[in-house]
Image (spheres, rainbow, N blue to C red):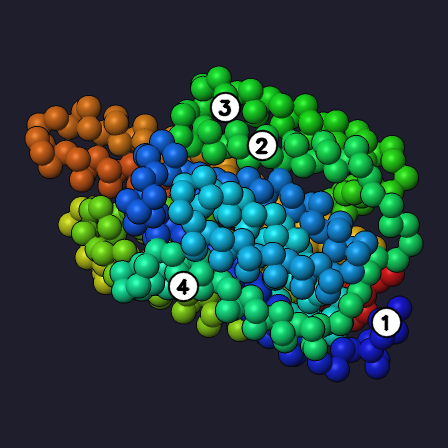
Amino acid sequence: MANPNYPAGQAPDRWRTLFVVAIAQLMIVLDSSIVNIAIPSAKLDLGISDANQQWVITAYTLAFGSLLLLGGRIGDFMGRKKIFLIGLIGFAAASALGGIASTQGLLFGARALQGVFAALLAPAALSIISVTFTVPAERAKAFGVIGAISGGGAAIGLIVGGTLTEFFSWRWCLGVNVPIALVAFALATRFVHESKAEGNRTYDVPGVITATAGLFSLTYGFNQAATSGWADGHTLAFLGAAVVLLVAFVTIERKVANPMMPLRVVTDRNRGGSYLGSLVVGAGLFSMFLFLGLYLQVILGYSPLKSGFAFLPFTAGIIVFAGIASQLLPKVGPKSLMVPGLIASSLGLLLLARITPDTSYASQVLPALLIISSGMALVFIPLTSTSLHNVSNHDTGVASAMVNTSQQIGGSLGTALLNTVAATATATYAASHTSLGKLVHPFAMTHGFTVAFKFSAGLLFIGAIVLFFFINIGKEAVVEHEEVLVH
């Protein structure tokens, strides 16, 4: 049944709503990379040790990743617009606190608070898009905008972060969120319409506790593996606790009357395949930003700002092909875009795996970036659409949260796995090429990066296989099932 609040099921201010949500989405995505550039300056200013520097990132990812499912459910039950507004104000306040932080503890605490409010904001934003756009062609365009932001925002964050750090202060990498969030809040109060889940709105407290604790343990375990190794006692303890807690969570969800994460959300073939694909893509694509950024700065000697601009073609490729994907999605269906897109991105990573310490950016890195970005643009938009395909109004928020959760867990897994791969390959190369003398360091590091790129290419190819066998929505099904929001 069409949404009764809008004529013919269409929100009159839906394009203004998209603009507001896009601002919020850009702020969240920017924050994932903009702070990376600020870390060296923040370390000097606040006396942060090498051992503690990871908490600038980890404090945010732990809170964000572990609270996303709860944040999605809160939006469903309390109202998506209300939680969207609370998320904006909270994110702005936490960013301001981080921008004026006088100690490392205050900075870490502010970053954790940003993660808490981002866990409210991100699923609410996707839910608002899902319930606002009910016509397939328009919904595809809307997800195209969000997909372009999600794919290209990280590269933009590197440029913005480099500019603010180099010409102003690292503190503005956090403070810049305040005016953005306030503008989005003012526009949202007027153009975003309220929506809530139908039916039972009681909270599944045991599910909340086990899911939150389980996701926290899983995310922390992956982060610990990236810094201390897979055999570290803390790594094994947290990963073991995560398995126990998440198994308990699934058991609880099968038995309670109103589960926090209804298993129908993830057991649907297309949605479940989309979440699995999103996890694999998050793990595989992470290396491109992490290791290529290190290669440009450490091996080629680029400044942080120049390194950020070096990623600009990636953003351009995402934006251009996101528009193409949004036009094609209602005509050819999602699988016809996602599978070739992942294969193309995998080939781009293999091209990137051919770099050396003497490689030219224009001849080797630039073509690879354009291939990867064009392929990923064909993945992001339909993947978001299939993740929310045919989901009921009652479950829109928690289904949206699963999109972000799978990406977040995938990114954490990618960090741990590919760091280990790169470090092992680097050490092995250095030990077997001692004849290079002082030159062994750049060659060994570059070799480690290239091996990580090959593993990443393999992960994306596995993602293509997963989506090929799981996704069975054709263009007819997209039109048939997404013309209205199912209640």
Type of amino acid under label 2: Leu
Type of amino acid under label 4: Ile
Per the image, the residue denoted by label 3 is 235
Question: Contact (CB < 8 A) between labels 2 and 3?
Answer: no
For this view, does 457 lie left or right of residue 359?
right
Residue 373 or 125: which is nearer the viewer?
125
N-terminal-most mark, 4 or 3: 4
Q: Which type of secondary structure does the marked residue at label 4 adopt?
A: helix
Between circles 3 and 1, the one closer to the viewer is 3
Residue 48 or 285: which is nearer the viewer?
48
- The span from disc 2 to disc 4 (Cα, nearest Å) is 29 Å
Q: Which type of secondary structure does the marked residue at label 2 adopt?
A: helix
| Residue 402 shows in this picture | no
Between circles 1 and 4, the one closer to the viewer is 4
N-terminal-most mark, 3 or 1: 1
Per the image, the residue denoted by label 1 is 2
